Image (cartoon, rainbow, N blue to C red):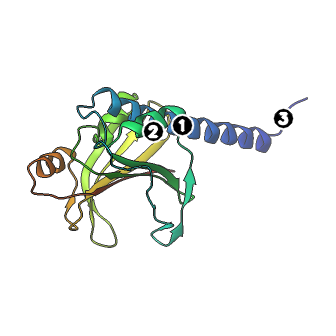
Amino acid sequence: MSIPLFDRWFANRFVNRIAHKAAFASAMLLCVLWSAASALHGGAEPGRDTSFQEWPAEWEGAPLRPLALSEVEHRFADRFPGAIARMTDGRQMLVMRRVDTPTRMLHPAADCYRALGYGIAQARLEQDVHARLWRCFVAQRHGGQKLHVCERIVDAGGAAFTDTSAWYWAAASGRSNGPWQAVTLARPIE
């Protein structure tokens, strides 16, 4: 019995979407592991409660739905000087981090994606509809789906950084004060 062309197309598309979601989740997990492996900071300040963070309920007018951290992400978050959350607005994945102290545990997203075997292309600064500047790139595995990834870091005074190293040195030298909010957005390019 042969499978009709539409059914084969639908099955292939469904399998590809599931595979993409699994690869995306793996990429985010490896990014966290990559950060932990090269961390120079041992954790949050002693005696400081960093377990609670109220995250935004919406992003750009769309409601956010929290996504559970994996066991490995929880272990990383326990050492991270701040708090970490993964969320989705239904069309893109958001990784939000509150950073309480300058740390090398905060890496550029491009480094994480490269470590996962993604090729990085079209790296550039982009301005969103609110005139905010983001560092963006396209990540793609050979033959896989492309992702548009953007990131930025904002300090307590509203100053923004699109370069992780520039943020680190400004924070470590006292020219930028925290807590800081780091946001990484990743959405599929269809």
Q: Residue at x 10, y 54 (%)?
A: 174
> Which of the two labelled residues, at mark 2 and mark 1, occupies the earlier sequence position?
2
Label 1 or label 3, whichever comes before in sequence order:
3
**Amino acid type at mark 3:** Ile
> Which residue in the protein does label 3 denote?
3
- The residue lying at 38 percent from left, 40 percent from top is 139
At mark 2, the secondary structure is: helix
Which numbered tag is attached to residue 23? none
The amino acid at mark 1 is: Ser
Q: Earlier in the sequence, mark 3 or mark 2?
A: 3
Residue furthest right in the image: 1
At 50% from the left and 33% from the top, the residue drawn is: 26
The Cα–Cα distance between marks 2 and 1, rounded to whole angstroms, is 10 Å
Amino acid on which disc 2 is placed: Met
Which marked residue is nearer to the observer: mark 2 or mark 1? 1
**In the visual, does 117 lie left or right of 5?**
left
In this view of the protein, which residue sits in the foreground, 19 or 74?
74
Residue at mark 1: 70
The reply, left or right, for residue 84 in relation to residue 169 is right
Q: Quadrant of residue 118?
A: top left
What percent of the width, then of the height, locates residue 81? 31, 44
Q: Pinpoint residue 46: horizontal percent, then vertical percent.
A: 30, 42
User: At numbered mark 1, what does the secondary structure look like: helix, strand or loop?
Assistant: loop
Residue occupied by mark 2: 28
